[in-house]
Image (tube, rainbow, N blue to C red):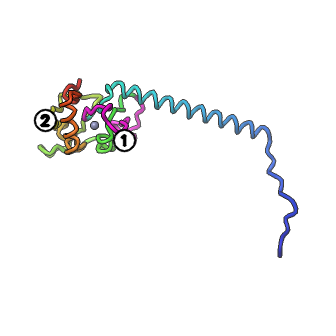
Amino acid sequence: MKMKITSIPPELPCCELTAQRRRNLLMVAKEALRNAVQHAHATREAVRQRAHRRCEYCRFPEHVSNLPFHVEHIVASIHRPDNSLLNPAWACPRCNLKKGLNLSTIDDQTGQQVHLFNPRTMVWHNHFAVGNGCIEGITPCGRGTVRLLDMNAENRVAHRRKLIEQGTGQPVDAR
Ligand SMILES: [Zn+2]
């Protein structure tokens, strides 16, 4: 049987209070989002300034990078949620992506499981040294971190040598 539509069905009744409430909820959500974005931006800037705009793992300077640096979580939230400023580190994309969620690795020399370098609790020069553009791990932690983060990949070493030659010499002048 063919049905004939004779009129448009009326809309569902919409009470003013519900509409007002919807507007209020939207305003609250927008405000919360704005605050979250501002907080994230402030955190990112604080982490960046603390690191002197260099990767806290390989010491690569941000100003010569073609890619934006990341706020890296030293202990990923999957292990332990930590929103304090003690957890984030400023990292180049290479180090961040290689580190991933890892907290430890294996030291090739001893075969032992070792903690990765933690920029908040460890001093860079106590674990790494630089020679001819290569970063050398001088402790089990340093060696494991260099290997896992692939710090001496051919193109990274070449770039580092160039920076050192040009006098933009991180990581040799790292604090
Ligand atoms: Zn790096």
Counting residues from the start of the chain, the first of labels 1 and 2 encountered is 1
Say if the magenta span includes residue 63: yes
Which residue corresponds to mark 2? 132
Q: Identify the residue shown where x is 22% and y is 44%.
A: 155
* Disc 1, SS: loop
Q: Residues within 10 Å of mark 2 (few under 14, many from 20)?
A: few
* Disc 2, SS: loop
Q: Please, what is the dominant secondary structure of the magenta stretch?
A: loop
Task: Give amino acid for label 1.
Answer: His
Task: Give the residues in magenta.
Answer: 58-84
Which residue corresponds to mark 1? 79
Q: Is mark 2 within 8 Å of ligand 1?
A: no
Task: Give amino acid for label 2.
Answer: Asn
Q: Quadrant of residue 48?
A: top left
User: Residue 170 appears at what percent x and percent y?
Assistant: 23, 29
Residue extending furthest toward the front: 166
89 vs 104, nearest the viewer = 89
Q: Ligand 1: which quarter? A: top left
Q: Residues within 10 Å of mark 1 (few under 14, many from 20)?
A: few
73 vs 82, nearest the viewer = 73
- Is 86 left, or right, of 164 in this rendering? right
